[in-house]
Each structure stands twice: as structure tokens, then as C-alpha cells.
Amino acid sequence: MNDHALAQEAEAARAYEALFVPSLFRQWAPQLLDEARVATGDRVLDVACGTGVLAREALPRVQPNGLVVGLDAMAGMLEVARELAPAVVWRQGDAQQLPFDSQAFDVVVSQFGLMFFPDKPGALCEMHRVLVPSGRLALAVFDGLERNHTYAREVALLARTAGEAAAEALKAPFVLGDAEALARMTHEVGMEAVEVTTLKGTADFPGIGHLLEADLRGWLPVMGVNLDEATIQEVLAQAQVELADVIDPRGRAVFEVSVHLVSGRRG
């Protein structure tokens, strides 16, 4: 990757960290780590770590003698992650071919990553491989778009004003909504005691503009969709009207999100 491409990735990653993490993603990290029973001395792998919110949350739980490793495919995400938490071990790599020895970790976690892997069972197989016997797995994925209504409305808005590529990029996080299929896929790679729990959380953005800009400037570029400024402004203007009902009395954009939490252990 050349310096210009890395700088673009890092810029998108900083937008992701600033816009998404506090408003949407941070809330799930403690629940996911509680589900995985992360404790002092554990060796923890965070797959598709992004800018590292889950790994950062795990680090104080495993100290003083544990280890947290964050893995992501994108160099720009890892550049920001290293700036924020140099004590975590950050590795670039493919979730479908994890660059680690078998049985290297006590816990594998992944927050909102599994949806994007082309070979999802293959990635789960790799997570199973690197776990010790009785090692714990915990994953978070979004429920289906039909149960995340505000995002479904935003997808429709993007399709009309920014084109199908932008709409499809926003649909991508919601492809694992079938909880039974998700549990079956996790069990079929060898995980035991698999459970899928559907949780309701709250997205809480400073305003409609922040919500849309998180996607337009923070998410779509990560997915390879870069809109011109005129299109971004048109989408923002339309959203102020079409999504006005999610504004609370403080002026913040607040709405419910539905998430699946998957847990299991290696036999």
C-alpha cells in the first residue's frame, strides 16, 4: 500500500472512531467481554478489531499478565488503533487465514466483523482453530435490516439520492439477521454450547447530520464508496426532513438498534 492510500484509510478510520465508536459501538464491548468471561491472565484475540474499541476494553481485564491481540485487514484502522492503545499487540491479517498457531488463545472475540467476511464459516473455523480446548468465543453482529428500522430508512434514502452502490454498502452490516442460521453455522464449525441472544441497544448520535456523516464519511469509504461533496450535502439535507422523527428533545438522533450476541466454546 502506498503512502497516499494508507493516509486515505487512516482518515476514514479516524472518522469511524470519532463518529461511530462513542455513538454506536462502545456500548456492546463490556457485554461481549462479560459473555466471554474475559479475566486476568487470558490471551484474547479480537478479530476484525477496527480501531480497537473492544481490544481496548479487554486490556485492563487481562492485566497484569494477560495478552490482547487485535487483528484487522486494513492498515489504516490499525494505524489509528496503535495510536490509541500501544499496549495492545496489533496485527494485520485475514480473518479467514489467521496468522497464529493453533490453540494460541483462551478467548476469541469479534464485534461487528463476521458480516463482512466472504467466507464466514471459514473465518469461524479459524477462530475455533486458534482457541485452546474449552476456550471461549463471543461475537456481536447486527440483526436484520427489517429489525433495524432507522437504518432501513437510511438505506432507502441513499438508494434514491446517492445510488445503489452506497445503499448496498449500508446494507452490508445487516446480512446475518437469521439467528437460527447464525447458531447453526457456529455449531457446524465445531463450537459447543452455542447460544444466540438478541439484544436491544441505543444509537445516540449528536444529531441527524452526525448520524449520516458517520455513514457517508466514516463507513462508506471503508466499504470503497466515496461520494462527492455535492451528493453528501444532498443526502444530509434530505435526511433532516425524512429522519426528523428520531430527534429527541435534546436535539440528538436517538433510536433503537437490534444486535445478535453469539457465544460458544471449543470442545
Image: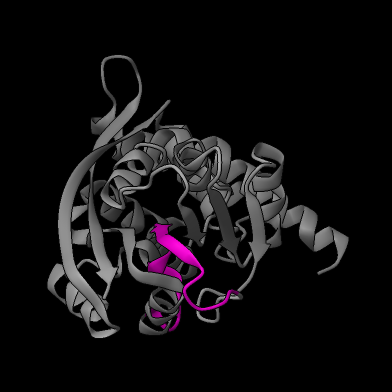
Q: Residue at x 42, y 61 (%)?
A: 106
- Residue 73 seen in render: yes
The answer to which image quadrant residue 138 occupies is bottom left
Q: Residue at x 50, y 59 (%)?
A: 45
The image position of residue 226, as x and y in percent, is 62, 59
The image position of residue 86, as x and y in percent, is 70, 42
Among all residues in the image, which is located at the extreme left?
Answer: 180
Among all residues in the image, which is located at the extreme top?
Answer: 250
**8 sits to left or right of 182:** right
- Viewer-closest of 256 and 265: 265
**9 sits to left or right of 19:** right
**68 sits to left or right of 259:** right
Which quadrant does the N terminus fall into? bottom right
Above or below, 48 relative to 26: below
- Please report the bounds of the magenta region as a residue range: 100-120
The answer to which image quadrant residue 242 occupies is top left
The answer to which image quadrant residue 18 occupies is top right
Residue 234: say if magenta. no
Q: Residue at x 45, y 51 (%)?
A: 42
The image position of residue 83, as x and y in percent, is 71, 40
